[in-house]
Amino acid sequence: MKPKIPVVLLAAVIISVLSGCGRSLYLNQLRFGVWASEKDLWDEAVFRWKKAVAADPLSVAAHNNLAVAYEKKGLWEEARKEYAIALKLAPKNTYVKYNLDMFQENLDSLKKEEARKEANAADDKK
Amino acid sequence: MRPMIKSKALLAAVCILQLACGSENARKVKLQIPGPSPINLADYTEVAIINFRVEKETPDIDINKEVIDAFAFELGRGYKGSVTLRTIAWDREGLIEDRAFWKGLGAGSEKTLFLTGGVRYTQEVRKALIGDDMKEIDGPFKSVNRGLAERRIFNLVADLCLIRADSGEVVFRKEYKETRMFLNPNQPFSYAFYELLPRVKKKFFRTILGEERGQERYLILR
């Protein structure tokens, strides 16, 4: 009867592994996207993370990463939408919150800079 | 005992796999993220630089050529489409607003954008009363200490436009004005131009291409 405990434990771990790493399609796409982003292949990363979203529409990681890729490509509206979805799925996720805060801060500073330049230009004309 | 050893080995392997899968949640990445741009150059396959309307020709510099060269070079670096050069006759006022003219020049090409505008490079001499605490403006050598000083001021004004070839619509227009002052009254006319032009160019392309800024973001790995 002794082997029963390890077998039960083994079964539990296998189930855990299958549920954690077993979503192979989704994870492959997610990781492929990360790999592509590291190689500065952002179009490929977008393609992969879109597939990851299609495989698991509730994936915070896929939406977050897709938003980062959109930011990299200067597609602000798309990035904003993806961050919003990611945050809705995981309101307490610190990574998503950090990214979104930085995204908004970046956009705000750029807008302020543009406004300041416009004001300077108007002053010059006067 | 053998099945027991086998199951233990399998258990260990699975645990290692589990640990490997769960070792890292997110990765911090450094990105160069572009700033917002009023126009998406990627929508166009060609940017045609049209000769600029130079308000005052100068003997020692071909301003039009210098500006075109500078802009063509910069576009070649940051733009993936083709960059071509075209020449028109600036024979009347209000040509920039003349949609029909640009539409005709573009022959309905949807994917072409014209870059053109006017350039004015001028100098003026201003006289100013100066004191002992005169700051160094153009170098460490003070030419005069007191009294009435001449200051040579160079202005480069570039009215730059981006025009759609298919509709003749001006999609971007902005006047850039750069000034440089020298104490040396004999400063050559061309000298400041080569300092002012890169400033205009930098500001224009920062706006158009959306200058990249270093940012940090997290990619989530699971």
Image (tube, coloured by chain):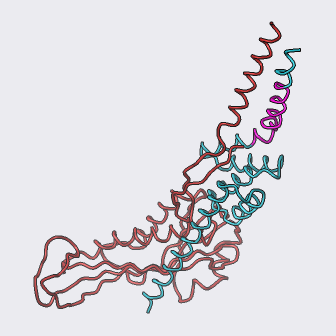
Image quadrant of residue B195? bottom left
Residue drawn at the location 56% of the way across and 53% of the way down = B31
Residue at x 44%, y 89% (from the top left corner): A125
On screen, residue A46 versus residue B124, left or right, reads right
Percent position of residue A124, x then y: 42, 87
Q: Residue at x 14, y 90 (%)?
A: B148
Q: Residue furthest front?
A: A1
Tell me which chain appears red.
B
Start-end of magenta stretch? A9-29
Whole-percent x, y for residue A49 in the image:
74, 48
The image quadrant that residue A68 belongs to is: bottom right
The answer to whether A86 is drawn above or below residue B99 in the figure is above
Q: Which chain is cyan?
A: A
Q: Residue at x 75, y 16 (%)?
A: B9
Q: Is residue B179 magenta?
A: no
Could you tell me residue B109's position as x and y percent? 70, 68
Q: How many marks?
A: 0
Image quadrant for the N terminus of chain B?
Answer: top right
Answer whether residue A13 is magenta in the image. yes
* Most common secondary structure along the magenta stretch: helix
Toward which corner of the image does residue B142 lie, by quadrant? bottom left
Front position in the image: B75 or A70: A70
Horizontal placement of B151 versus B175: left or right?
Answer: left
Q: Residue furthest right?
A: A1
Up-down: is B183 above or below A126?
above
State the quadrant of the C terminus of chain B: top right
| Nearest the eye: B16 or B87 | B16
Q: Residue furthest top?
A: B1
Q: Is residue B208 above or below residue B143?
A: above
Where residue B198 sits in the image (x, y, percent)?
40, 68
